[in-house]
Amino acid sequence: MSWIACALAGAALVWLGGGRLESSASRLAGHYGLPEIVQGAVIVAIGSSFPELATVVVSTIVHGEFELGVAAIVGSALFNILVIPALSGLLSGRSLPTSRDLVYKEAQFYMVAVTALLLTFSFAIIYRPVTDGGPGMRGELTRTMALLPLLVYAVYIFAQWQDTVDHEPEDDGRTIRPGREWARLVVGLVLIVAGVEALVRSAIGFGELLGTPSFLWGITVVAIGTSIPDAVVSIRAARKDRPLASTANVLGSNVFDLLCCIPIGILIAGAAVVNFSVAAPLMAVLTLATVALFVTMRTGLVITRVEAWSLLGTYVLFVAWMTAESFGVVDLIVDFPPGR
């Protein structure tokens, strides 16, 4: 019960901090005249992805659990692209419109992000293999390798900056106090870090208590908890008839999660060991989920209610699979025994 309370408290802090951060980031983006799609894909996306970044840093440096941080990133990415667009459409009471910009720029660049991270993991196995008798194919991720996904994210920011240069800002009539909004944003970040620490501790506690890998709780409990700000941002945007910002936030958050959160954790920690036998199958699942979202977005440039329910069903199947893997019911992931 204490670990359940810890997880709930952590999720509540992340939700509270995420709400403050999202509202302040949105107001500041409007104040500086950024286009709607850039607001969702960059400014708000980075803000709402701060929990994932904090998870990698806290789990790696404080608890020495780099795999838990990676699990939280992958689990959060899956939750973002399968659950959040579906809930945004269902709770808004209508199908969720998309656009060609979202499909052919945001979604396709997100596919590039998945590929770049998988290549980075592959380089760790090829150039810095770890052969100490540990489980699976493992390699050491170094700071030099971490620069590859960061460079790819720099290209993404460049593309978004080009859109900002070409944008003609519209005056919405609102006046804000930038200093106050920046202060609210910082308070939100502090609350998120405290909430993430509670979530990571609960994940480790659940693993020790039930004899299951903390990886399982990272990819479910921590991932869902840290995705709360993304869900709040996207659902609010969809209900306020801003569907493009809703979906752009999801894709932009995932691009930041994959290309920045893990590499920044490596830069801070110096190096970390990744188990490719676990990472590769999960990245394959993430790729298939990305293709599924791309198809649903492209067909008619709208995510229908039927497609929304199919995305939710896919996520439920994924959680069931991870649970079965952790308890040894199935063995599709190499070197993933229960209790590891």
Image (spheres, helix red, strand yellow):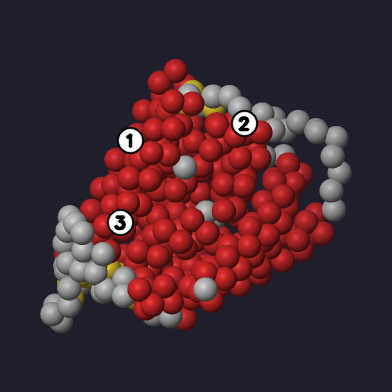
Would you say the residues marked 3 and 1 are in contact, meaning their CB atoms lie under 8 Å apart?
A: no
- Looking at numbered disc 1 in the image, what kind of residue is underneath it? Val
At mark 3, the secondary structure is helix
Q: Residues within 10 Å of mark 1 (few under 14, many from 20)?
A: some
Name the side, left or right, on which 221 lies relative to 22: left
The residue to which callout 1 is attached is 291
> Disc 3 marks which residue?
322
Residue neighbourhood size for the residue with mark 3, other residues' Cα within 10 Å, grouped as few (<14), some (14–19), many (≥20):
many
Residue 335 left/right relative to 113: left
Q: Nearer the viewer, mark 3 or mark 1?
A: 3
Q: Which residue is mark 2?
A: 92
In depth, the one of 208 and 249 nearer the eye is 208
Q: Residue at x 29, y 40 (%)?
A: 288
Q: Eyeballing the image, is 214 above or below 299? A: below
Q: Position of residue 169 (x, y in %)?
A: 72, 33
Circle 1 or circle 2, nearest the eye: 2
Rounded to the nearest angstrom, the CA distance separating label 1 from label 2 is 24 Å
**Which residue type does callout 2 highlight?**
Ser
- Distance (Cα) linking label 2 and label 3: 30 Å
Q: Using the image, tell me which numbered label, if any, was put on residue 75.
A: none
Image x and y of residue 205, in percent? 43, 77
Question: What's the residue type where badge 3 is placed?
Answer: Met
Q: Is residue 17 visible?
A: yes
